[in-house]
Each structure stands twice: as structure tokens, then as C-alpha cells.
Image (spheres, rainbow, N blue to C red):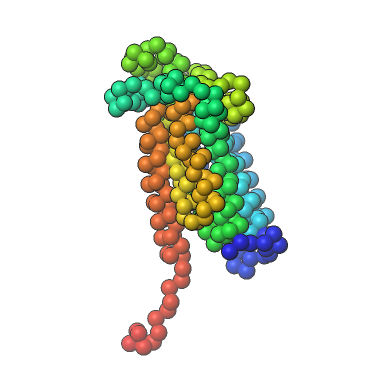
Amino acid sequence: MAIKIGELFIREKKATKGLLAFEWVAFGYLAFTVLMMIILWDKLANPTDMIKGRIQFVLVTLALWAVYRLWPCRLTIFLRILVQMAFLGWWYPDTYEMNRALPNLDHIFAGWEQSLFGCQPSLLFSQKVPYGWFSELMCLGYVSYFPLMLITYLYYFFRRYQEFQMTAFVMLGSFFAYYVIFVLLPVTGPQFYYLAVGTEKIAAGIFPNLGDWFLTHSERMAAPGWTDGFWYHMLDLTHDAGERPTAAFPSSHVGVTTVVMLLALRTRSKGLILTILPFYILMCLSTVYIYAHYAIDAIAGLLTGCLLYFALIALWHKKRDSAEPRPLLTLNLIL
């Protein structure tokens, strides 16, 4: 049932006293990163700034919790979720600060790519389809990442509010699951690895081990395609703002968008499904086209996205069922 604007401010009768499930997920990831920082402390470039950032995250989260406690309503819950979404953009480059202290693994993944396909699809895709209009579609698909999530959040908030917090839990849980992998698995993807090695060697099937190259290098290849295109420029802006040599395997762009697609299918809303579907298809293709990922990254993103969706949905329902009070046995049943 759709909610009206006036209902956003109505105080809840049974307000949640503690942190919400998606906030506990974020705090769990924070604890994981602090542990990794302790292990890698001597190899980190700016551990003090990283600690300060985490303190700020905790203070903002607790401040929003306090606002909700003062006025527990749908709007303050929405703000708590929206801020956690915004922090995802801060957590992402933070993975690079830790994984660059570990040996790079791109040579292994590029080798697997070559063994599976007999070539490097990311290197050849744009050469096989060198059209400006196709380039723009690819760039549009890639930059639609966060808008697709926001559209899905808003749909659940206004049309299926009873499942809104579940949606936030599944989305943010998926993100942080990928971020854990990215910290532990330092794979940069073609746009960084190909540039460091040289496309001539890559085309010849030569994939050297770069060791700790990305500890001090973060240069990337320019995306292929129509450089004068509007969406190409938008892609460039997003890359300049937050892209780092990190987070290649599996593709979280494909994985999280798969989660979004499954959440859209869950609603059975033709409008939402038909809105998300074309961008989902573009996303699966664009990650390889623009050199962001190896093809195996995109495939792994699809598979892990499905796995995370069903696992987190099951975990949510298990948590909810365990939280529901059990009916007391009557005297007759006891006897």
C-alpha cells in the first residue's frame, strides 16, 4: 500500500530502541576493517586519517539514531538508511588503502580469463563494437549504478514500506560482503593492470606478476568509446571522483545490480521491472566494455549477486522470526 506524505512524520508507537539491522551490518564491517588496519598498520599510508574517518562515521550514525529516538517516524528511518547509502562512496576507496599492502593478483585472473576465453574480452569488446551510440549506452549503463539503487529504495519506501528495512539490509549487506572480498583479494581490473603491463603484452598473452606495484601507482587507462559523448564525460567524472585500483573480482556493479533486479522482480511491479531491466543488461555488458572488469568478474558478480540476495533474505526472515514472541503455553497444555 502506498504511503502519503503526511504519514512520514507520524510518530511510531513501537519505536526500535537500538540500532537497526542494516546499521549493525555497517558496524560489523567497521570492526572488520579496524582488525585489518591493526594487522597492516605499518604498511598503511594514512592510518590516522582512516581512524578519524571511522570515528566520524560512528558519530554520524549515533547522531541519526538520537534524532530518531527524539522523533521516531518513517522519515527519520529513511534518513538513517540514506546516510548509510551515502557512506558507501566513502567505504569503497577505503578498500584500496588496505588491499594495496597485499601482493597484486591480476596476473592470475588475467591468466584465467585467457584460459577460459582464449583472449581478453575487455581488450577486444570495444574494438569489435566501435560505435559512438553503443559507447554512450555502455557509459549510461555504468553510471546508472547508484540511481538504480535509489529508485528501488524509493519504490519500497513508498509502495512496500513493510519490506523497506529488509531491502536496506539486503542492499547494504551485499555491498559490505563485496567490500570484505575486495580488502582480502587485491585485483585491480583491466583499466589498471593493462596500463601497467602494456596492451601489447596483454594481447600477446603475457601477464606478469606486478607484486606491490599498486602500492605506489594508481594510474588507469582511459575508457574506450566516444570521448565527446555526454555519458562518457559523466563516466569520467565518476571515475575521477572515486575510482581506485581495487574491487575488480567479483564485479560489485554486476552483483549489486543483480540484487536490485531481484528486488524489483520481488515486487511484481511491471513499471519497476521494465525500468530496471534495460539498465541491468547494460550494466552487465558495460563493466567489460569500459575496461573496469574482466569477463570472469562480471560472471562472478552475477552468481554472487544471486547468492547474496537469497542468503540475506533468508537471514532477514530468520532474524525476524526469532525476534517474534512465542505464545505462552496454557495450563491445559502444560498438564
Q: Nearer the viewer, residue 39 or 93?
A: 93
Horizontal and vertical percent position of residue 172: 50, 46
Image height check: is 234 above or below 280? above
- Residue that protrudes farthest toward the top in the picture: 200
Quarter of the C terminus within the rendering: bottom left
Choose top left, top right, bottom left or bottom right for residue 304. top left
Q: Residue at x 54, y 23 (%)?
A: 132
Is residue 9 toward the left or the right of residue 334 in the image?
right
Q: Nearer the viewer, residue 141 or 109?
A: 141
- Residue that protrudes farthest toward the left in the picture: 115
Is residue 296 toward the left or the right of residue 59 in the image?
left
Q: Is residue 193 visible?
A: no
Q: Is residue 128 visible?
A: yes
Choose top left, top right, bottom left or bottom right for residue 7. bottom right
Horizontal and vertical percent position of residue 122: 42, 24
Image height check: is 315 above or below 277? below
Q: Residue at x 52, y 47 (%)?
A: 274
Is residue 182 toward the left or the right of residue 73 in the image?
left
Is residue 221 toward the left or the right of residue 102 in the image?
right
Quarter of the N terminus within the rendering: bottom right
Horizontal and vertical percent position of residue 231: 59, 29
Q: Residue at x 40, y 52 (%)?
A: 310
Give the total number of marks visible in the rendering: 0
Q: Residue at x 56, y 40 (%)?
A: 146
Q: Nearer the viewer, residue 155 or 88?
A: 155
Horizontal and vertical percent position of residue 263: 48, 51
